[in-house]
Each structure stands twice: as structure tokens, then as C-alpha cells.
Image (cartoon, rainbow, N blue to C red):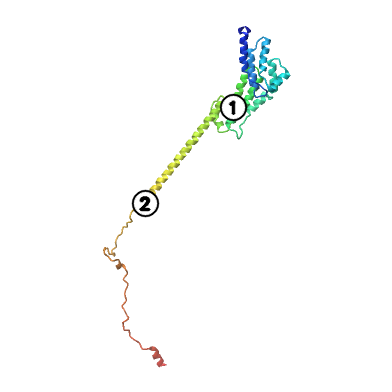
Amino acid sequence: MKETEITTEQYKLRLQVWRDTIPIYSGGNTYLSNFINQVDSFTTHLATSDAVLNAGIFAQVKTKIRGEALDVIVAEKPQTWVECRQLLIKRFSDPSSEQILYTKLFTCSQLANQNYENYADEIKTRLNKLKEYLQINLTDKNMIKMKSDFYDEICKNTFINGVKEPYHTYLINFETNNNEECLAKCHVYDNHHRQFTFLTFMSNQESRDSRMKGNNVNVSSRTQSKNKIISQPMTYNFIPTPYMNTNSNYNLTQLRPNFLSFPNTSGNNFPSFPNTCHVLRDLL
């Protein structure tokens, strides 16, 4: 910026506004990348050719450093933000190289007890670590963007190739740009699967109810037919024979068999014979 373009008061106001955008940093790897990016923007927009003003900018940066990170600054006594930046990277950045972080990204596989959403989160975590490394260790913005886009593509392909079935086969049928779109497709698949399962259940239920209704109709028809037969009076097609008396006044007692009766022989006089016992005795 040109010093003649703004007044000192305007510069101080702008300095205050930009300073408020810088987060507090107390050490560690988690927030280092964000802190460095914010300070880089701050110093880029407010740096001047005046050494005194630049020293004031760096003094504002140091007010945002706390804890273990401040201990490093106090011990090493850097004079500029560039020196301070290198100290923080050396002390708190991930010691892994870019190649190691890249290998961890594209070899990430889904665990047996891990759903696809947690798997996507794991891949994203590894991608962010790789991007943080780029932000911290590279100064060329074009190079950072080029590599970030490349690793975004690796992240998407890692998810598609590593996610379990049936999602893998489903995803390869679509053109997706990032992991967020892949997750959206997986959610669509889940919704379709739930709808299909529900419709299949309802179809089977309707078929079952229809069969049960048909069985009930058949049982009811058979029952009604049986009741109709039982309720009807029993009729016989009785055809008389020539030997049968068709007189309605016929006495049933006449149907008794007429056995032959023998004459009373109690009064008959059969011829009598002499007592043979006496005859034999006289002969002897």
C-alpha cells in the first residue's frame, strides 16, 4: 500500500480491524494452519516500506500468541513475522512429510464396523492434514491451489474405491466432483432402498391378506353348503315291489313271519306195545 493514500489514523483503524480477525494461538498442530493463514493475510495487506510500522504490525501479531507458543517466541526472540512463522512451523507442525500424508490419504480403507459416513469423515480428516501441511510449508498460492485440487480428487476417488458394497457399485455409475456429492448419492441410495423395502413389505402383506380372504370365502361356502344339506329333510325314492302291500292301512303286525304250527298231539292215541322187559324175562 502507498503511505500517501491514507492518513495515520486511517491506517491505525485498518490495523485494528485486521488484528481482530487473527485468532488466539497457544501452540499445537490443530490451529496452527489457520493462525498462520490469518497472519499472512494481515501482514500482506498492511505491510509497508516503513520498518517502524512493520515492527508495529508484528507487535500486534504477538499479542495473539499465548501459552507454549509464546514461550517459544520469548526464548528465540524473532524480529519479524517471517522468522516467527518458521519457528512456529518447526516447533508445532506435523513432522510427517507431504509424501507420508499423501500415502495415508489414498490408502485409507473402510473398517469392518465403520459406516460410510464415518469413513468419509476419516478421509476428510487426512485430507485436511495434508492441506494444512501445504498451507504451512508452501508460500506459492498457485502451487497450494493446484495441489489442493489434486488432493481433493484423490480424496473422492479414495472414498469411491474404498467404500463397501452396495455403495461402491452404485457410485461408479455417476460423475461426482467431491466427497460431499458422493455422500449425497449414498443417502439417495439409502432412501430408495428403504422405499423399496417398504413397498415390498406392503405388497407381500396385500398378497397374504388376499389369500386369507380367499380361504375364508371358500371355508364359508363349504360351511354354508354343508349347513344347507343338513337343514334339508331326508327324502328317499321308495319304489314298491310287486310283493309288497301298498295299502296305507296295512297292519305292521302282519309282517311278522307266519311260522308253521304243529297240531296238538297231547290227545292222540298212539299204538301201545307190550312191555318188552317182561317178555324177555319170561323167555329167559
Residue 43 image-quadrant placement: top right
Camera-side mark, 2 or 1 = 2
Q: Position of residue 256 (x, y in %)?
A: 32, 68
Q: Pointer 1: what residue?
A: 157
Q: Who is closer to the viewer here, 157 or 45?
A: 45
Left or right: 191 with respect to 110? left
Q: Amino acid at mark 1?
A: Asn
The answer to whether residue 203 of the structure is visible from this angle is: yes
Q: Amino acid at mark 2?
A: Asn
Q: Residues within 10 Å of mark 1 (few under 14, many from 20)?
A: some
The answer to whether residue 134 of the structure is visible from this angle is: no
Left or right: 275 with respect to 95? left
Rounded to the nearest whole Å, what is the CA distance between mark 2 and mark 1?
A: 74 Å
Q: Pointer 2: what residue?
A: 227
- Up-down relation of residue 271 to residue 27 (above or below): below
Q: Position of residue 90 (x, y in %)?
A: 70, 21
Q: Who is closer to the viewer here, 277 or 179?
A: 179
Q: Who is closer to the viewer here, 5 or 119?
A: 5
Q: Position of residue 160 (x, y in %)?
A: 58, 29
Q: Position of residue 101 (x, y in %)?
A: 65, 25
Left or right: 47 with respect to 214? right
Q: Which mark is residue 102?
A: none
Quadrant containing the C terminus in the rendered view: bottom left
Q: Secondary structure at mark 1?
A: helix
